[in-house]
Amino acid sequence: MEENNTVYVKKNGEVTLIYVTPEMLKSMKESCAGVCGRCDNGYASKCLKVADETIRPIEMYDFITDGFQTMDSEGKADEIFIAKCNNYKEDRPRKKATSTEQLQELRRLKESLKIAYFDAMDIDEADQTQFDLRRRSKYRLIMPEELNQVNSENAKGRK
């Protein structure tokens, strides 16, 4: 014999206790899947349900108008599945960037990083600073003692 699951159903703000089969519960879960995941307010800072560390009874959330809550084997509130919520805010569809737009964004980010790294006012100043540093490291200054040593070694090699 199949064991029925205890479920609190909330419809238009009214909560009713029902018992459902595992197949019915699976179907109910599929019908409500992902509402919070598609919501722009689905963050702890914007939604009490998401912020709560413990699961409260569904009737405690006034903004949830339609949904249901399962109970665990001890009769405690378990998962909440939401079908309709007054706080729901449609997640704006994100436009996929073209490769040209992605490249432009990467160049802009690279320039911003370069400006910050070289503590410059703009990209031209950052480029000039980078150029100057590269030139200095390639052609480093030689101290007079080193120059004398190099000259004497070169003179010995000529003899």
Image (spheres, helix red, strand yellow):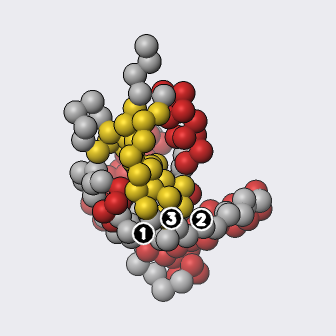
Query: What residue is shown at x 37% (from left), y 51% (from top)?
Result: 150
The disc, 3 or 1, on the residue closer to the chain's N-terminal end is 3
Residue corresponding to mark 1 = 63
Mark 2 burial class by Cα count in 10 Å: few <14, some 14-19, many 20+: few
Query: What residue is shown at x 46% (from left), y 81% (from top)?
Result: 120
Q: CA distance from mark 2 to mark 3?
A: 23 Å
| Tag 2–tag 1 contact (CB < 8 Å) | no
Q: Secondary structure at mark 2?
A: loop
* Identity, as a three-letter code, of the amino acid under mark 3: Asn
Which percent across, then down, holds residue 143? 31, 64
Give residue 132's mark.
Answer: none
The disc, 2 or 1, on the residue closer to the chain's N-terminal end is 1
* Identity, as a three-letter code, of the amino acid under mark 2: Asp
| Tag 2–tag 3 contact (CB < 8 Å) | no
Res 30 visible: yes
The disc, 2 or 3, on the residue closer to the chain's N-terminal end is 3
Q: CA distance from mark 3 to mark 1?
A: 10 Å
Query: What residue is shown at x 60% (from left), y 67% (from top)?
Result: 90
Residue corresponding to mark 2 = 91
Which label lies toward us, 2 or 1? Answer: 1
* Identity, as a three-letter code, of the amino acid under mark 1: Phe
Kindly give the residue lying farthest to the top in the view shown. Answer: 1
Residue corresponding to mark 3 = 12
Rendered-image quadrant of the C terminus: top left
